[in-house]
Image (cartoon, rainbow, N blue to C red):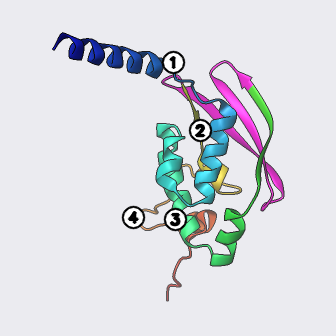
Amino acid sequence: MTNFFRIMTLALTTTLLLGSCKKRASPEEVALAFMHAIQDSNYDQARDYATKESQQVIQIYAIFDGRRSGAEREKIKNARIEVVNIEENGDKAAVTILNSSAHQKEVLQMVKENGQWKISLTFDSIIPNYAPQTGNALDSTGVLSADSAAATGIIMPETK
């Protein structure tokens, strides 16, 4: 019996030591993992790489992605993602990604959250020319205004 406890104690100690030595992901690793999750339309996994405040932004992006054509999704999925620059400053970082499908550079803002690098998204990072409203997007009757809908790409039905 004592040999059993010795083996179990040794196994537990080894597991704890190896687990505590686990390397934290770099900003580059997190940025690439996040972008690959987005490419695969795996938004649950993408949320794992994002700050708590970015969760809603990813949810909205998922809605926009659902409206893309199959050809657009295929182009995104097959794009080559390459890190071209990393600027780290304390608990903040900016990772510049070159996306072959968009033929442009994208800068992902990152912050450390609980000691781990996370992507920090804002609405203007997913919606071009996003300008926050000075109130909410609903008019006085509780209906989404046409201007707000247009700014977010939502197609409003015609009213008679």
Against 151, is 70 above or below? below
Which comes sooner in the sequence, label 3 or label 1? 1
Q: Name the front one of labels 2 and 1.
A: 1
Helix, strand or loop under label 2:
loop
Which comes sooner in the sequence, label 2 or label 3? 3
Asked if residue 136 shows in the view, the reply is no
Cβ–Cβ under 8 Å for marks 4 and 2:
no
User: Which secondary structure is most common in the magenta stretch?
Assistant: strand
Helix, strand or loop under label 3:
helix
Magenta region: which residues? 88-115
Q: Which residue is drawn at the image coordinates 54% and 40% (left, top)?
A: 49
| CA neighbours of label 2 inside 10 A, class few (<14), some (14 to 19), many (20+) | many
- Indicate whether residue 95 is drawn in magenta: yes
Which comes sooner in the sequence, label 4 or label 2? 2
Against 135, is 157 above or below? below
- Residue 31 x %, y %: 66, 41
Q: Amino acid at mark 2?
A: Ser
Against 140, is 55 above or below? above
- Indicate whether residue 108 is drawn in magenta: yes
The numbered mark at residue 63 is 3
